[in-house]
Image (cartoon, rainbow, N blue to C red):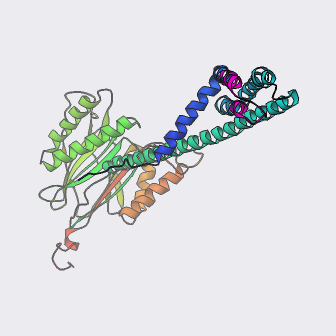
Amino acid sequence: MDIQTRRPTTDSEPRVRGFRLLLLLDLGRRHPLLIVVIIAVAQAIVLVGFGSVSDTRDVFGLPDSIAALAAVVAGILAGPLAGAVVAATGAAAFWLWVADRGHYSTLPTALASAIVWITVGIVSGLLTTALSEREAKRLEAASLLAESRAVMSAQAEAVQLHSSLVGSLLPTVSPRHPRLAVASYYHPREDRLLLGGDFLDVVLRDGGELAVIIGDVLGHSPEAAALGSRLRAAWQGLTLAGVDLQTTARSLNDLVLLCDPESLATAFLAYLDADNDAALCLSAGHPPPLLVLDGDVVPLDVPPALPFGVLTETAYEPLDVELPASWALFLYTDGLIEGRAGVGSEERYGEDRLVGALRRLESYDQGSLHRLVAEIGSANGGSFDDDVAALAVSCQDRRLVAPLDGPAGT
């Protein structure tokens, strides 16, 4: 059985043909003298040849039709001036070798035909120029449209990539705990790239402990954001693997030295044990968290060690902290308090004002945390000069909390 196949046509084929036509016309525009010489010589040869073998009784015979055709071709390929020159050349050859030698045409008739040929060459050149310019604009518009679509697609991919990276800096686990509630806030200084060096995360460990980390990588570049994401991912893996806090801190220090020896990062790490009212804390040069106890707010007294990335051998010693039955722990990066105390003020917002703002809070849920950050940002003129990350963990008295699957307590 014979199978006939046909190459499918595509929308690009007319565009390709138009592009080839533009190349041919462009060649004629760039070398008009060459086009004129070739066509004029060919035209003269044909006119002389036909004039020697055929009668020319009027200006509409074959030789002069060839002259008109030559003028049209020259006008199309090389423009109106070239068409006029070729037409004039054809008129001279027609008179000298055809009309005058054969005595079949008078000078006025030859002049009239020459005017017709020159007009045809000029009009053909003008029309072709207009059409080629129109085609060039159409192709340019199509190219700009394709380029615009490519740019829009690239921008969409970039936005998606940045959103994914920002998402990787935020807590990925919402722990289900009967006594602990977690609220978080993250905003990079670089609004255009949506990248920042701050990072935070929360993980529920086996046994019911809540592991938290908040940190700040030096700088605001994409490299700083990438390092922060690596530290967070490494911390998460070590924590879920059951690695102790001291080894985890040493590993994060080694990671900074390995990835970027010129950079450094501060961090606060803690294992919060609500069942035993205790916390195991470690600070690598990070601002101390604020502990809320019965309406009072005090810095958590955890001696800081060196930031990650300073020395190869650094002693990281966790500290046990006793906690009451009910408390709230507020962790933050320094970008939150380094802004101005008020619009036009020269004073920094500072830790003391943050303590006062925390005392005014009635709860530490997600909405309260966002309102607190918005209040601090308003004091600085509506924005922050640095990356900002904040984490609030609140704990309820076990006597007031029912088991997850049990009846409500009293």
Is 222 included in the stretch rendered in magenta? no
In the picture, measured across the screen, residue 275 lies left or right of residue 396, that is left
Give above or below for 321 relative to 394: above
Relative image position of residue 138 (x, y in whole percent): 59, 44
- Which residues fall within the magenta stretch? 45-68
Tell me the residue at 56%/31% (across/down). Answer: 23
Relative image position of residue 6 (x, y in whole percent): 36, 49
Q: Return the residue nearer the eye: 21 or 259.
A: 21
Q: Return the residue nearer the eye: 358 or 206.
A: 206
Tell me the residue at 15%/59% (across/down). Answer: 208
Give above or below for 12 relative to 49: below
- Residue 81 seen: yes
In the picture, measured across the screen, residue 310 lies left or right of residue 334, that is left
Q: Main secondary structure of the magenta part?
A: helix
Report the number of discs. 0
- Residue 302 seen: no
